[in-house]
């Protein structure tokens, strides 16, 4: 099996509580104090999709794990092969400065189901790895900007579709609307 980094975060604050790498059999161990945690594969090994425990694709949908006393919990992950990664840059409307901390969500075109998400880094960049399929990109902007789909619309049906077929797609950039 591939070595994958596992991180455990405090559920209420998002602060990293511990981390480990899987061994050759896929097992890992992270010791934490009693509390509520979210566990995920948050580094992106080549060809796998980041996942949180219970097959969640984002922090907000991740299932919290409660640790009481000397509890030992097991979080099992199934990591499908990714068809490719979608990446781009989010910039401000007027001055085109990189927009940091903007949530980027990916929805399946046919069902509208949320299948992936990322937050832009300090340079406005994001990357989301996905299985082959048809997707639409939604940017949940902050109070300074309007939320929008890739192609500058707020209408799901009018949003441009991105097709992932075994290759990375770069340059899915958005200019935020005030």
Image (cartoon, rainbow, N blue to C red):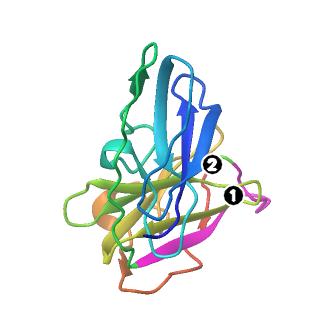
Label 2 to label 1, Cα distance in Å? 7 Å
Q: Position of residue 68 (x, y in %)?
A: 43, 15
Q: Are marks 2 and 1 in contact (CB under 8 Å)?
A: yes
Please report whichever mark, 2 or 1, sits nearer to the chain's N-terminal start.
Answer: 1
Label drawn at residue 178: 2
Callout 1: 10 Å neighbours few (<14), some, many (20+)? Answer: some
- Which image quadrant is residue 110 in? bottom left
The residue shown at (46%, 13%) is: 69
The residue shown at (39%, 74%) is: 82
94 inside magenta stretch: yes
Asked whether, in this view, residue 80 is left or right of residue 150, the answer is left
Closer to the camera in the image, 170 or 52: 52
Q: Residue furthest left?
A: 111
Asked whether, in this view, residue 77 is left or right of residue 167, the answer is left
Q: Position of residue 63 (x, y in %)?
A: 36, 34
Asked whether, in this view, residue 102 is left or right of residue 159, the answer is right
The residue at which mark 1 appears reads as: 93
Query: What is the total number of numbered labels drawn onto the structure image?
Result: 2
121 above or below 2?
A: above
Asked whether, in this view, residue 130 is left or right of residue 97, the answer is left
In this orientation, does residue 115 appear?
Answer: yes
In this orientation, does residue 142 appear?
Answer: no
Tell me which segment is drawn in magenta: 84-100
Q: Position of residue 13 (x, y in %)?
A: 60, 25
20 inside magenta stretch: no
The residue shown at (39%, 51%) is: 57
């Amino acid at each position: 099996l591939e070595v994958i980094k596992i991180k455990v975060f405090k559920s209420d604050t998002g602060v990293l509580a511990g981390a480990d790498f899987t061994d050759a059999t896929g097992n890992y161990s992270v010791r934490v104090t009693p509390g509520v945690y979210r566990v995920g594969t948050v580094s992106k090994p080549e060809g796998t999709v980041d996942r949180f425990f219970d097959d969640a694709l984002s922090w907000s949908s991740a299932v919290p794990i409660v640790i009481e006393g000397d509890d030992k919990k097991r979080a099992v992950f199934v990591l499908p092969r990714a068809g490719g990664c979608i990446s781009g840059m989010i910039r401000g409307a007027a001055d085109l400065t990189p927009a940091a901390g903007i949530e980027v969500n990916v929805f399946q075109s046919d069902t509208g189901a949320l299948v992936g998400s990322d937050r832009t880094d300090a340079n406005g960049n994001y990357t989301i790895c996905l299985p082959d399929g048809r997707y639409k990109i939604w940017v949940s902007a902050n109070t300074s900007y309007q939320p929008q789909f890739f192609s500058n619309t707020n209408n799901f049906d009018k949003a441009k579709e991105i097709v992932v077929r075994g290759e990375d797609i770069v340059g899915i950039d958005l200019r935020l609307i005030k």
